[in-house]
Structure formats: structure tokens, C-alpha cells
Image (tube, helix red, strand yellow):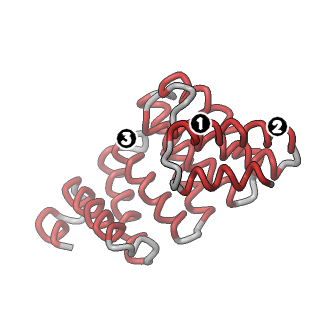
Amino acid sequence: AAGEAAHGADSLATADALDLLTLVLVGAERAATPEALDLVERAIAVRERLQGADSPALAHTLRGLGKLATASNQLDKAASCLGRAQAIYRQQLGDEDALTIEVTVVLASVSYRRGDYRAAQALLEVVLPVQERLLGPDHAKVAGTVNGLASTLYQLGEYTRALELWERALDIRRRTLAPDDPALAQSLNNVAL
């Protein structure tokens, strides 16, 4: 890459350039290509060598790789990267930082997709009260987390609790979203189950 030619393979400028190139590939809907995954892994290696294993910049790049791996259905890789990013964000930024919250929700989604419903439940039950406190109980992101927790509980056979949470998500979405929003349709479908 041009960044490597100008700055060398082990420079932060190269890692930044690799991150930017990855964003371009994601924007071009090439997120699941081996090329994109390789670029991010190279950026991670450079960041770990130069910035250390607990750098927020490393966490950002790990988060990106976790999302790319999720898009390409490499769920074990996604869980590993997102778990590392979450640990760094929690240590460096705290549990109430927007990045910590976001990566926790994405990690819960990956856990759900892997069939690890208990892990998804635990993550969502930790992040939900934080979101409610920071965003308010009627925020669309809260509704998304409530919906995810309900779906997880449904998979665990906790049908009554799942229905209560789906109804809550539906109530929030009815008040906060447009009538033709797909998330509202999802909530209506969930309650109908």
C-alpha cells in the first residue's frame, strides 16, 4: 500500500492508512473480502507493536475487524476481536462510554448468532441499565437492546419474560419511530409470535 511505501510497514501512519482503506472497502460493500480482513489484521499488528495491547486506537481497529468478521459470518473471530475491544474500552474509557456500549451490544449479537444465548443475555442485561440511564428509557437504542434481550430470552425458553420485553420494545418503537420503520415491523412481528 502507498502508506507502507511512504512510512514503512511498522508505522502508525501505515496503520491509519490501512484503517482508512478498510473503511473504503466497507463503504464499497467489500467488507467480507479476505483482502479487507487482511488489511485490518495488519493494522492491528502494527498498533499492538507500537501502541500496546491496551490502546483505545487498537480497540477501535479490533472493533472494525469484529464487524467485518461478523459481516463475513466468521463469528468466532468476531467474538474474539469484539471481546478484546470491549475489554480495552471498559478499562480505558469506562462502562458508560458510547464505544463500550456499542461494542457490548454488537458482541451480544454475535453471541446470539453463535447460539451462546446465556452470554448474549449477560451482556445485554449489563448494557441495558446503562443505556436507560444515559439515553432515557424511551430511546430507540434502548428499544433495540430490549428487543435483543427478549429474543435471547425466547431462545432460552423464558417466553413470558420475552413477551413482556417485546411488548416494551414495541411500545417504545411505536412512540419513537415512523409507522413504516422496519424496526417497528419487527416488533409487531415479535409480539405476534
Task: Name the quadrant of the N terminus.
Answer: bottom left
Query: Quick one: which residue is furthest to the left in this view?
Result: 6
Task: Classify residue 143 by image quadrant.
Answer: top right
159 displayed left or right of 5:
right
* Lower position in the chain sequence, tag 2 or tag 1: 2
Q: Determine whether 27 is above or below 164 in the image.
A: below
Residue at (14% x, 71% y) in the render:
5
Residue type marked 2:
Arg
Q: Nearer the viewer, residue 17 or 164?
A: 164
Q: Determine whether 112 is above or below 5 in the image.
A: above
Find numbered disc 1 in the image and state the secondary structure of the residue it sits on. Answer: helix
143 displayed left or right of 4:
right
* Lower position in the chain sequence, tag 3 or tag 1: 3
Residue at (32% x, 66% y) in the render:
22
Find numbered disc 2 in the image and state the secondary structure of the residue it sits on. Answer: helix
Badge number at residue 172: 1
- Tell me whether the residue at label 3 lies in contact with that at label 1, contact meaning CB atoms closer than 8 angstroms: no
Q: Position of residue 55 (x, y in %)?
A: 37, 40
Q: CA distance from mark 2 to mark 3?
A: 39 Å
- Residue under pointer 2: 161
Query: Quick one: which residue is furthest to the front in this view?
Result: 179
Q: Position of residue 141 (x, y in %)?
A: 52, 40
Q: Determine whether 38 is above or below 178 in the image.
A: below
Find numbered disc 3 in the image and state the secondary structure of the residue it sits on. Answer: loop
* Lower position in the chain sequence, tag 2 or tag 3: 3
Task: Name the quadrant of the C terminus.
Answer: bottom right
Badge number at residue 55: 3
Q: Nearer the viewer, residue 82 or 180?
A: 180
Residue type marked 3:
Ser
Q: Determine whether 134 is above or below 142 in the image.
A: above
Residue type marked 1:
Ile
Task: Give the number of the mark in front: 2 or 3.
Answer: 2
